[in-house]
Image (cartoon, coloured by chain):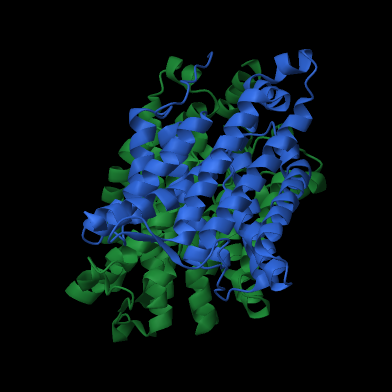
Amino acid sequence: MTMESTDMTQALSAPRSRKVSLPFARLGYGAAALALLAATGVLEGYELFLASSILSYAIAAMGLNVLMGYNGQISLGHGAFFAIGAYAAAICIDRFAVPFALTPVIAGIVGMGAGWLIGKPALRLEGVYLALATFGLAIATPTVLRSDLFAEWTGGVQGLFLLINPAPEWAGLDLDQSIYLAVVGYFLLFAFLTLRLVRGLNGKAWIATRDNPIAARAMGFDVTRAKTRAFVFSVLACSVGGALQAVAVQFVAPDSFPFFLSISLFTAVVVGGLCSPLVGPLLGAVFIVMVPNVTEEIWQGGSWAVYGGVIIAIMAIQPRGLAGMLGWVKGKLTTHTNRKQQTGRNRPC
Amino acid sequence: MTFFLEQLIIGLSSGGIYAIMALALVMIYKSTGHVNLAQGEMAVFSTFIAWTLVQMDVPIWPAILLTVAVSFVGAIVLERVVVRPFAKADDLVVVAVFVGLFLSIHSLAGAIWNYEVKPFPSAFSDGSISLMDDLSIRAHTLGSLLTTGAVLTAVWFFFRYTRLGLALRAAADNHESSRLVGINVSVMLALGWGLAAGIGAVAGVMIAPVTFLDPGMGLAPLIFALAGALLGGITSPFGAALGGLIVGVLEAMVSAYVPYGIEFRELIALMLILSVLLVRPAGLFGEIVTRRV
């Protein structure tokens, strides 16, 4: 009890160190954003596709990281929302010829609807039980996508090929470039949103709810609302990420959203680093896109082994994942060690 | 009517397997408070060991017994090496470790035995047995039903009438007090894992002749077993076994009578999990956990 409350007061008074470094941080973010945009001209073909993939998974991971890291709710089933977003985008393009850059908006709305349906009951569950329920969701999703019942819309087992029109000619962009630019746009939007939410009052409510719901309530936070907001934001991010992924691949089929997808998203968040709002999800997304690329050539199912081993190793060494390790190295280099980051090894955040 | 009875028997027989798996989940949950997400994969791994033994011309029954023994020891090692260090960690860390275990065991099975679907011999004769005029069931169905009954009875007997069973129950109930009366809790935890893996191996060997053997076959039974365990109460071995049977029958009925039922079996298990957790989180026979805050 006492430990938890000190944790929380620390968490609530955390932004102290931030004020000093803010101008530098802003410059850094600006430079990173420019670099992402400039990459449109530098990368080509397959590299652009990989980058689009990584960024769309990163958007999903950012949302899931808010839910798991900041709010402490465990989900093993967010692949379902990723799939819903992807299919929503695919159906929009296939049926209604919606411009591809707009589909994530519609996917986000549809996804939030589905998230509300599932979240309403699921959010009453705590800890491991939420993990179990979402684990069930992850297992059930592929069978629903494969069903003949919705085949008229979803294309059933065959899936849907998406005909995507590039940006108008005056823009001088080819198809890969236009898709990549749209993905970067949404990525920047979500990066901005995530940082704002996490550093604002919402973030404090999430952390407080995670660490000690009763104390949080006593301090005037609406615990249920905080949980719901975290869940809805994570669902929104996952469905937008799914939509962008569908656009990047230009194809959706049940086999693109297997049970393994949910586990991959979970892996991205855990490996990348819980409670690192931007860097963690980005590193995690790079991890889940690049590892299968390398391992599947050597050994089918090899990525499962790498994921499994890395997850266990990270939990044993540094529960804050790759981003936590980066932070640790940075702390060593600057000798200005942040004490908060080094305590509580069994606690991810 | 005959069709209904056939479905009922099929349901009971797969339900029996879910019951055994659910029992394995309960075994670990009761002793450690963790839900072992890797339970299905562990059972599949055991089944592959049995398959290898059978390929090496070991008769099926000795092969099964040997497999159970190997699984028992393997799980104890696994608990010691991988799970124990995280015993007191945060929920999220524990879940992550189980996911890691799940993935590792799955891919290890794939790496050793590849992803080809393999037939698995039944431990019983291949024919069918006629029960009534026009109702006959496969010997394997009947055999696995009987095996389930035997396993459940043995487990019940073990917990109810043996000293070791009593010690295990005590350790599960209260680590501190058990230590005070001289029970080695650490050994009991390991024993819980070993028993769960042994029981899981039996479930795997019984289901493999029906579903065939491949590394991915543990997933669906796991969600049904989970639904069964939660329905019956994850703290009650008896409840979990009954829950498993109910889920099995429900699955068979839904597949037989509801349009598109076969496709939505997993979804129904999910609904069941959600509704049990919401309406009666302790399940039908579980004890209601109270916590001091």
**On the rendered structure, is A4 left or right of A37?**
right
Residue in the picture at 23% in, 66% down: A150
- Return the x and y of residue B55 as percentages of the image width and height: 69, 73
Looking at the picture, tell me which residue is in the foreground, A62 or B277: B277
Q: Position of residue A297 (x, y in %)?
A: 64, 80
Residue at 55%, 72% (x, y): give it: B119
Residue A271 shows in this picture: no
Q: Number of numbered discs present?
A: 0
Quarter of the rendering containing residue A42: bottom right
Q: Which residue appears at 33% of the width and 37% of the height?
A: B275
The answer to whether B274 appears left or right of B30 in the picture is left
Residue at position x 55%, y 64% from top? Answer: B122
Quadrant, the N terminus of chain A: top right
Q: Nearer the viewer, residue A226 or A332?
A: A226
Tell me residue B53's x, y (percent).
Answer: 72, 66
Image-based side of B31 in relation to A176, left or right: right
Residue sitting at the far left: A96
User: Does B224 appear above or below B49?
Assistant: above
Q: Quadrant of the C terminus of chain A?
A: top right
- Residue A220 percent across, percent down from the top left: 41, 18
What color is chain B drawn in?
blue
Any part of residue A91 in sight: yes
Q: Give the chain ID for the green colour.
A: A
